[in-house]
Amino acid sequence: MTASCSDFASDVQQAMYDAKLLREDDVPDDNVERQTGLVLDVLKRLVEIKDLAAALAELVQAAPAGEATLAAAAAVVKSIETIVPRWLVSDEYGHCFVGSKETRTRWAVDLETGKMVYAQSFGETKWSDLHRDEVEDLREDVMDVNEVRLSPEDFGAVLRDVPPTWAHDEPVEAVPA
């Protein structure tokens, strides 16, 4: 009996859940293309980690310390920076827009580009995309005033390898962070 591609993909996805590389909440049930993309993103991260481990092993073996070893160490440190989760996400963040009371917001910042890519506020019954000027106001509060990226847990935010499930395929006009 042979396994189908969908069985294999499901097994890979389940292994990622079990290893806590991917959260079930981050994977939409109804979008196979997005599911596949998220799994591929995690696999790319694992390859980066494997490459980093290989670089560290070479560095350790390249004994006598000197300028070349320090340069290699600096390159490895630079590699580590690229393995950090790509997304800074909040599913619930209170923000006071100019001239209004506190508003429930949710947002996602792409740490690779430094831009707030997804941003929404909750109205009376549903979430709606923010307008560009509102995104800029929120971005300034999140990234500049409160510096959420330095201690996300203090603000109810998390670092993730994948965007949140509520983020749609078309991001808001990205505002630099």
Image (cartoon, rainbow, N blue to C red):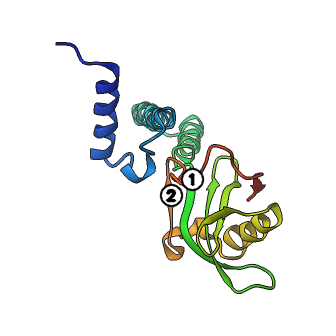
Pinpoint residue 7: horizontal percent, then vertical percent. 29, 26
- The amino acid at mark 1 is Trp
Q: Splitting the image into 4 quarters, where does residue 50 fall?
A: top left
Which residue does the image show at 75% across and 79% down from the upper left? 97
Q: Which residue is more in the foreground, 23 or 74?
A: 23
Q: Answer yes or no: is residue 62 visible.
A: no
- The amino acid at mark 2 is Leu
Residue at the farthest left position: 1
Q: Answer yes or no: is residue 89 visible.
A: yes
Under tag 1, what secondary structure?
strand
Would you name the residue on which mark 2 appears?
159
Which residue does the image show at 46% across and 33% down from the upper left? 32
Left or right of 72, for residue 118: right
Q: Splitting the image into 4 quarters, where does residue 72 fall?
A: top right
Pinpoint residue 60: horizontal percent, then vertical percent. 40, 36
Would you name the residue on which mark 1 appears?
87
Question: Which numbered tag is attached to residue 43?
Answer: none
Which residue does the image show at 52% across and 49% down from the upper left? 84
Q: Is residue 64 above or below residue 93?
A: above
